[in-house]
Image (tube, rainbow, N blue to C red):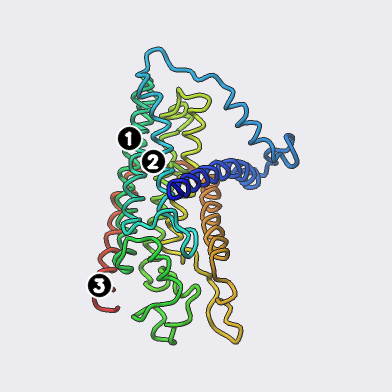
Amino acid sequence: MNFYLTYFFIAIGLFGFSALFALFGVYAERKVSAFIQDRLGPTETGKYGSLQTFADILKMLQKELIIPAAADKLLFMMAPAIIFIAVYLGFAALPWGPGLVPSKLNLGLYYVFAIISIETLGILMAGWGSNNKYSILGAMRSAAQIISYEIPAGFALISVVMIAQTLNLQDIAAQQGVLSPGKTMFSGFWDVSSIGGILAWNIFRAPHLLIAFVIYFIASLAESNRAPFDIPEAESELVAGFHTEYTGLRFALVFLAEYSMMFLVSMIGVILFLGAWNTPLPNIGPAHLAAWTTGAGWGILWIMIKTLTLIGIQMWIRWTLPRLRVDKLMALCWKVLTPLAFLCMLISGIWRLWLM
């Protein structure tokens, strides 16, 4: 019984975290967009407009749940739940610190990549079930975009897996604490086998993984339907995309899934490329800086700082770059990112066999 209660409270905690992140993420994005565009953003509701998002959510929860008369009611009602649950279940395998992982799966990365792909099914259900031409066009665009960009993202992640020799996210994170023996980009200059810190991150252990990280980050923007890849929600063309007909709590679930996806893809990038919960400080000097910034508490702090930094960059990009045209978006995926990601995967194989 205690076993099931533990996982129940973990599930509730993760849901509460995703809800709170979406709440504060919306407020932060409004302020970031206002700063970039030389505006004020929310100011009236609460101190510095801090209660504006609470007011919006309260209004959304009170709205009537409308089902279009010609809609497929079952698909229409199930779609938002499937979209959110697919993203929410991805949090189960993410390590938050040393020993702090909801479910330590040997195939953790494979599980996350597989479970979030179900979101595409929910998006297609939402578009088709709405019986709205704008919704189905948005759903088809979104499905094509997500499925296409999963390929370079997958190749980029496989590049790390080939170096780490495991799909267990906790093990990949632990490997970036202290450099394991073998060839690194710094091996010709000094002995780095015990320094750790930022030099142990995968993007520094194997220099081609820096390119793989950039590829993954660009693909993750498309996976999250974030600008400049937010064509599925092209307001000026499609009204709102696949969720045109949704109101109230159902729309809130779609919105919550988008912000949860932002956090999920950013955290995966941190775990695989940027040292996960390990300190960036080197283990050198008389004080051994790394020794003072390790442990579960510090691990949560480091991984949150890195993840929120990537999310901040996502917001910055949204309010800086214009939306890509759909043919340019697909050309970027198939003609640029996919070949480069495949090249990174090939280099990982050579690196692992000959240099490690």
Per the image, the residue denoted by label 3 is 350
Above or below — where is 311 with respect to 229?
Answer: below
Per the model, the C-alpha gap separating discs 1 and 2 is: 10 Å
Callout 1 crowding tier (Cα within 10 Å): few <14, some 14–19, many ≥20? some
**Residue 348 occupies quadrant:** bottom left
Q: Which numbered disc flags the more N-terminal residue, 3 or 1?
A: 1
Q: What amino acid type should be assigned to the residue bearing mark 2? A: Ala
Q: Tell me where residue 27 appears, x and y as whole percent.
A: 62, 42
Question: Residue 72's mark?
Answer: none
Q: Which numbered disc flags the more N-terminal residue, 3 or 2?
A: 2
Per the image, the residue denoted by label 1 is 121
Q: Residue at x 56, y 45 (%)?
A: 21
Mark closer to the observer (3, 2): 2
Q: Tell me where residue 153 appears, x and y as whole percent.
A: 34, 53
Q: Tell me where residue 196 appears, x and y as whole percent.
A: 47, 77
Callout 2 crowding tier (Cα within 10 Å): few <14, some 14–19, many ≥20? many
Per the model, the C-alpha gap separating discs 3 and 1 is: 37 Å
Q: Residue at x 42, y 81 (%)?
A: 186
Give the camera-side residue of 172 and 245.
Answer: 172
Q: What amino acid type should be assigned to the residue bearing mark 3? A: Ile
Left or right of 225, for residue 63: right
Mark closer to the observer (3, 1): 1
Q: Which numbered disc flags the more N-terminal residue, 1 or 2?
A: 2
Per the image, the residue denoted by label 2 is 86
Mark 2, secondary structure of its residue: helix
Above or below — where is 110 with respect to 31?
Answer: below
Give the camera-side residue of 61 and 225.
Answer: 61
Q: Tell me where residue 108 appears, x and y as whole percent.
A: 35, 56
Mark 3, secondary structure of its residue: helix
Q: Residue at x 45, y 33 (%)?
A: 234
| Mark 1 touches mark 2? (CB < 8 Å) | yes
